[in-house]
Image (cartoon, helix red, strand yellow):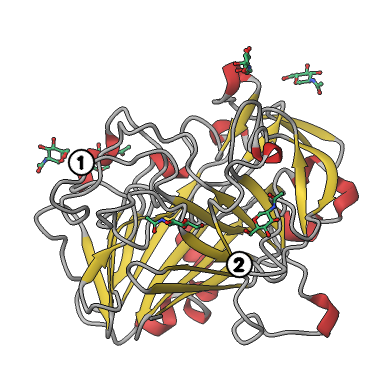
């Protein structure tokens, strides 16, 4: 039904590029779907439209699996659910008091964090707990879709979304389109995918250091960040990342762990949390109109040990970074990761989550003026987000 009304739109966008595609390629024995190009290979699953494995080569020519995940598709539905590699939706990150207002009407979303105080990632049955449908799959590209019904988790109106991952040499492309087909509703998506991907550029195989604290991060446009309370809910304040402060990743590249012992880092990711779980603002406007594909990466992450460098390009104006302070050595790595003699588990600070997204909880902060980026309705423009993850090696 929705499909027939949307078909013209889709033909013009997502599906057109697949019209000459070969017949669908099936899943492997672990229930994963592969796409690849020169120098890069990714495995994906319908559950949460998640990336499960991402293989690139380091400076030694060895292929490393640099994202967290599980060995097979069924393992994702277990009790442990850290949103590994998925697309949270329909509204990523937290919603204060699980409440927001559109055109004077108040909406209450099912809470799922902090004993019911707030919503995280679209509610207890958010998109990252659901199976997406594979609508296209070629050797270098896969498209997932989801129909999120009116009223699900408390959100108004139906949302139909298409998520396309494409590989070109050394590059992973992500394109998300979402349409609010019946009512005005908030939409913010990310790839823990891109959005919720947990990175370790050594594939957990560095014998001297299983953590990612010695990964180097550079966010040249992120001189500001969103201030949050003790449970990571924005309080409306935009803070400066003063030069040389713990949140300064803009004035120069810095190890993630460079300021680990600085007193200011305690409480920086919520009450009693040392590290980062922070929404950085991406300020690119001073040079006038820009093309996100060529205006330089919003973030670069590299590891000296593997020599793998990742440059992230995105059309989004915020960037969430989490330094995995909550990991405690109980989550296993995959059989494609680690090294002989390694722990086999994800230790504290052993991963980095980077999410390209918009300002978090902006639906409760109209003064930030993000309405056009976050509220969508029938007849208006579609929600879109694009990002490219480009890999290279350094010495
Ligand atoms: C999937 O992985 C889990 C966790 O590693 C394992 O317990 C399970 O046996 C695997 N299932 C299949 C079908 O391989
Ligand atoms: C939180 O939401 C509840 C309804 O779910 C509402 O009654 C209450 O006033 C809200 N609290 C705040 C501080 O906005
Ligand atoms: C997702 O699909 C798998 C495999 O078909 C199935 O076992 C599982 O129950 C589905 N999960 C949900 C939440 O629909
Ligand atoms: C990590 O970097 C620090 C400097 O920030 C250095 O002292 C340390 O030796 C490095 N650790 C490893 C295992 O390379
Ligand atoms: C954080 O680390 C950087 C790089 O080592 C250093 O220049 C800066 O002074 C440190 N800041 C704090 C607050 O410790
Ligand atoms: C924070 O840590 C202090 C000292 O260990 C403890 O007394 C307090 O209960 C902790 N607060 C929370 C919210 O965990």
Report crowding for label 2: few under 14, some 14 to 19, many 20 or more residues within 10 A (C-alpha): some
Q: Is mark 2 on a helix, strand or loop?
A: strand
Neighbourhood count class around disc 1 (C-alpha, 10 Å): few under 14, some 14–19, many 20 upward: few
332 displayed left or right of 374: left
Name the spot of residue 260 as percent of width and height, x first: 57, 44
**Which part of the image, by quadrant, shows the C terminus?**
bottom left
The residue lying at 84 percent from left, 49 percent from top is: 238
Chain-order first, disc 1 or disc 2: 1
Q: Position of residue 317 (x, y in %)?
A: 71, 64
- Residue pointed to by mark 2: 384
Quadrant in which residue 261 is drawn: top right
Which residue is at 18% across, 47% downward?
72
**Which callout, 1 or 2, points to the residue nearer the camera?**
1
Q: Indicate left or right for 289 with 15 as reference.
A: right
Residue 138 seen in the figure: no
Are the two marked residues, 1 and 2, in contact with CB atoms closer than 8 angstroms? Answer: no
**Residue 71 in view in this figure:** yes
Q: What element carries label 1?
A: helix
Q: x and y percent of residue 84 in the render?
A: 38, 46
Q: How far apart are marks 1 and 2 (CA)?
A: 30 Å
Mark 2, ligand 3, within 8 Å: the answer is: no
Q: Nearer the viewer, residue 277 or 260?
A: 260
Label of residue 74 in the image: 1
Relative to 133, residue 39 above or below:
below
The verdict on label 1 being within 8 Å of ligand 1 is yes
Give the x, y percent position of residue 22.
Answer: 21, 81
* Viewer-nearest residue: 339 or 83: 339
């Amino acid at each position: 039904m929705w499909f027939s009304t949307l078909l013209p739109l889709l033909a013009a966008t997502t599906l057109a590029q697949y019209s000459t595609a070969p017949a669908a390629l099936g899943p492997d024995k672990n229930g994963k779907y592969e796409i690849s190009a020169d120098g890069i290979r990714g495995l994906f699953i319908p559950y949460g439209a998640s990336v499960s494995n991402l293989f690139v080569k380091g400076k030694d020519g060895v292929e490393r699996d640099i994202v967290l995940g599980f060995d097979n598709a069924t393992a994702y539905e277990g009790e442990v659910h850290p949103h590994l590699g998925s697309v949270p939706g329909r509204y990523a990150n937290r919603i204060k008091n699980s409440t927001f207002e559109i055109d004077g009407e108040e909406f209450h979303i099912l809470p799922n964090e902090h004993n019911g105080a707030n919503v995280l990632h679209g509610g207890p049955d958010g998109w990252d707990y659901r199976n997406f449908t594979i609508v296209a799959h070629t050797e270098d590209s896969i498209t997932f879709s989801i129909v999120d019904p009116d009223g699900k988790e408390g959100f108004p109106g139906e949302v139909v979304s298409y998520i396309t991952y494409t590989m070109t040499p050394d590059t992973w492309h992500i394109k998300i389109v979402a349409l609010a087909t019946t009512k005005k509703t908030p939409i913010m998506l990310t790839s823990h995918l891109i959005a919720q991907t947990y990175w370790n550029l050594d594939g957990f195989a560095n014998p001297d250091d299983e953590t990612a604290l010695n990964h180097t991060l550079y966010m040249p446009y992120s001189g500001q960040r969103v201030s949050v309370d003790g449970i990571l809910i924005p309080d409306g304040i935009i803070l400066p990342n003063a030069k040389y402060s713990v949140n300064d990743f803009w004035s120069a590249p810095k190890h993630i762990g460079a300021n680990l012992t600085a007193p200011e880092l305690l409480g920086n990711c919520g009450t009693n949390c040392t590290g980062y779980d922070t929404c950085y603002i991406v300020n690119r406007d001073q040079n006038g109109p820009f093309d996100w594909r060529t205006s330089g990466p919003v973030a670069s992450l590299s590891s000296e040990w593997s020599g793998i460098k990742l440059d992230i390009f995105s059309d989004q104006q915020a960037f969430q970074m989490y330094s995995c302070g909550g990991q405690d050595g109980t989550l296993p790595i995959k059989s494609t990761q680690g090294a002989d003699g390694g722990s086999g588990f994800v230790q504290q600070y052993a991963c980095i989550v980077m999410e390209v997204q918009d300002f978090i909880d902006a639906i409760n902060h109209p003064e930030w003026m993000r309405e056009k980026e976050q509220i969508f309705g029938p007849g208006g423009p579609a929600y879109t987000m694009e990002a490219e993850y480009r890999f290279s090696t350094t010495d």
